[in-house]
Amino acid sequence: MFKEFKAFVMKGNVIDLAVAVVIGAAFGKIITAIVDNLIMPVIGILTAGVDFADMKVVLQQAVLDGAGEVVTPEIAIGHGILINAIIQFLIIAFVIFIVVRFINRAKDKAAALSKKKEAEAPAPAPTDDVVLLTEIRDLLKNK
């Protein structure tokens, strides 16, 4: 059973998937930093200083005691965090689209170049066996 598990784990697809997950997680952190620190402040300026991360609908206000300590925290729906997540998703999807588009164009150019080289290459000379069989065919056809 251990040998089967080891063979499964060492397959190329599983290792490739693990690498993709790790790189994807790191890429997600980069995108989160870009969205939170670069894009959202600019959008906040464009929307008169509104920070989407702070946007929420308060369902129940926090209850404070006489000293100002929070007895019961507020209950709120943080729809601004959802807006940030949607923006992050759109950025990631756009970047992946650009990368896949670049890879597909590179593959298409490579395939076109390969076909062009094949078309330009002269046909190989027939082997002795093919020449002999062709002569035999022609002789039989003429009889």
Image (cartoon, helix red, strand yellow):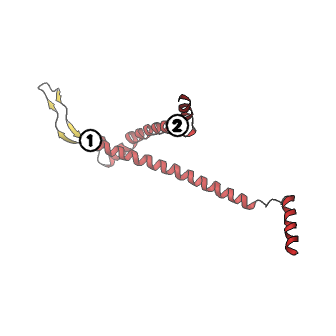
Q: Nearer the viewer, residue 103 or 38?
A: 103
75 or 33, which is in the foreground?
75
Amino acid identity at mark 2: Val
**Quadrant in the picture for residue 56:** top left
> Does residue 101 appear anywhere in the picture?
yes
Residue drawn at the location 53% of the way across and 53% of the way down: 101
Q: Residue at x 68, y 59 (%)?
A: 115
Tell me the tag on residue 78.
1
Q: Earlier in the sequence, mark 1 or mark 2?
A: 2
Residue under the point 40% across and 46% down: 89
Q: Are the residues tagged 1 and 2 within 8 Å (C-beta)?
A: no
Residue tagged 2: 19
Determine whether the residue tagged by mark 1 lies in a helix, strand or loop: loop
Q: CA gap, disc 1 to disc 2?
A: 33 Å
Give the image location of residue 54, x and y in percent.
Answer: 27, 40
Count of numbered badges drawn on the protein: 2
**Where does residue 16 sit, x and y in percent of width and height?**
54, 39
